[in-house]
Structures are given as structure tokens and as C-alpha cells.
Amino acid sequence: MDFENAREQFPALLHKTFLDAACVSLAPRVATEAIQNFLDMTLLCPARSSTLHHISMDEMRALARPEAARLINAGED
Amino acid sequence: MNGFRSAVREVVPLAHANGALVMLDDYQDCGTRPVNVRATDVDFYVTGTLKYLLGPPGLAFLYVRKELIASLQPTITGWFAQSNPFAFDVKCFDPAPSARRFEEGSPAVPNIYAAMRGIELLQQIGLDNVAWQIHELASALLNGAQKLGLIAKTPATSVGPLVVFQCKDAARLVEKLAASGIVCSSRHDGLRISFHVYNTLEDVRAVLQVLEENLDLLVTGTATVSGD
């Protein structure tokens, strides 16, 4: 992905010059869409039971660990 | 407070030579350049997603050097720290042998969903590219500010994504910038301007123009400013 495509992820940049990531960065569209997807899941409980629903939610937690490890060049465990 | 990037690679061997462990709090830098905790040789590393990782608040990461994990017992814990979380045994504290022993209860899952996308975006761009872009922008700002005679609180030898200028009235200057559609912040007498991969040289030109129009709010000259 190039810089110009990356900028499209941040609609606030159409209206302002944002130079304050040191305080709180802008989040990209894909991040807010991901939260919305999660919230939709909580509305519907698509699994057969709440326990399975819980496990399904926790899968994202498990996926985050290797992604974070890769970010800092650490081992996963 | 001034954008200084600590000399981690120099600090770590000094600390280890004197029997100390090293924890690096990288919250104000992670996401702006490649990180390699193994190469830096730190013992612990923490960061969060709110700033340069393009995520929401409420999510942080902890790295612990593998050889240290078994020797450390958490004082705050939860069911995800157990060797088998699904044992549901409240009378037996059996921490996982891996770094999972430092987890607690159910995390803020929505934040994870969002944070993953932010991190993935940075990985798609490439952290080397992110670092290059930030360096170009910070350098352009500092060059332009020098021509205006501004005093940078950020040490010239250690510039990262955050550049801080000394002001007579930093809060007022932030208001002036906001009136021009530019979002910055102030801390004490410092105007904080921070870059990320979504910024451009046009952003630098825009902020420099407002600074030039408001030199009365800034400290100018050749005075030496100590870092804090």
C-alpha cells in the first residue's frame, strides 16, 4: 500500500491537517469497521451457545498475539 | 515531553553490566519504525495502540524475555493467565508457562479488532517506509523552523516523530493553529507537532506558514534549550 492509498483511510484529513499522533492518532476506516463488525456480532450471538460465542470472540484475541509479536520481532510464546 | 528518542542500544548493556533488568516503554514510538526487541536486548517491552499504532485506547502489549518468564509470578492475574483457563479452578493458581501468564481476564475485545487493522495497515505500508516518511517530514519541519529562528526543544541528534518548539504561549499557538485547521497540542511551554505516515510535505508547509504568522508566540533566537 502506498502513502496516498493510506491517506484515504483517514477521512479527517480531507478537512484538517492532523499533526498530533503523539497525543491520540487518527484511526483508519478499517479499524472502525472492525469494531462495528464486532458490535454486530454481539447483537446477534451467531454461535450455537454463549460459550461458543465467547470462544469465537476470544479467537481474535489469540490472533492478535502473533501479529503483535511480528510487529516487534518477538517470539509468539 | 521533547520528542527525544532514548539511546536504548547504549542503555541496555550498561544496565545489564550492573545487574539491572531493562523495561522499554515504547508507547511514544512504536509504529513509527521497525522494532526488534531481540536486537535491542531489552528484558521487557511495553507499548499500546492509541498513538502511532493507529488504534483505540484500552489495549497494550507486554513482551518478556523468554528466559525470564518462568521466574516471574504476576501479582495481578485472571483466568487467561492459567495453564488451562477452562479448568475453572479458583483454588489453584497454575500460571501458564508461556507469557500468557501475564494476561488477566477477558480483554477489551473490540479494541483488539480495531487495533489489529491499524497494525496490519502499517505492516502493509512497511515500517521502513513509515520511518522514511516521518524522517522526511520531521527534517523538513526542522529546516523550515530553523529559517524562522525557532528554538527546537527536540535534540537535533535524536529526532523522532515528535518535534517540540519552545513557545512564549504554546496554548494560544495551538488555538491559532486550530483556527487554520491544523491539529497540534501543547505541553507547558512546548508546541508539539507529531507526524505519521498519513502526513505530507504540504502539511509541513501549512504549519510553518502559521508559525511564521505567529512568531510573537514563539521563542526565537539561538538560545540553548535543555531537554526535559
Image (cartoon, coloured by chain):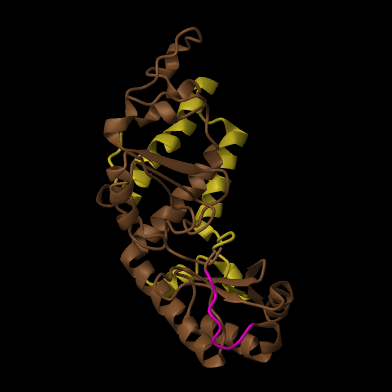
Look at 60% across and 69% down and name the residue there.
Answer: A12
Q: In the rendering, what colour is chain B?
A: brown
**Can the viewer see residue A49 in this picture?**
no
> Measured from the top left, where is residue B182 in percent x and y?
64, 76
Q: Quadrant of the N terminus of chain A?
A: bottom left
Left or right of residue B67: residue B48: right
Q: Main secondary structure of the magenta part?
A: loop
Left or right of residue B144: residue B95: left
On whether residue B224 falls in the magenta region, the answer is yes
* Frontmost residue, A33 versus A72: A72
> Measured from the top left, where is residue B177 in percent x and y?
68, 79
Look at 27% across and 40% down and name the residue there.
Answer: A75
* Frontmost residue, B217 versus A56: B217
> Measured from the top left, where is residue A30 in percent x and y?
49, 56
On whether residue B87 falls in the magenta region, the answer is no
Look at 53% across and 71% down and name the residue there.
Answer: B226
* Frontmost residue, A48 versus B189: B189
Q: In the rendering, what colour is chain A?
A: yellow
Magenta residue span: B219-226
Residue B178, image quadrant: bottom right
Left or right of residue A28: residue B67: left
> Measured from the top left, where is residue B207 in percent x and y?
59, 82
Q: Residue furthest front?
A: B18
Q: Quadrant of the C terminus of chain A?
A: top left
Look at 27% across and 32% down and name the residue there.
Answer: B67
Residue B130, image quadrant: bottom left
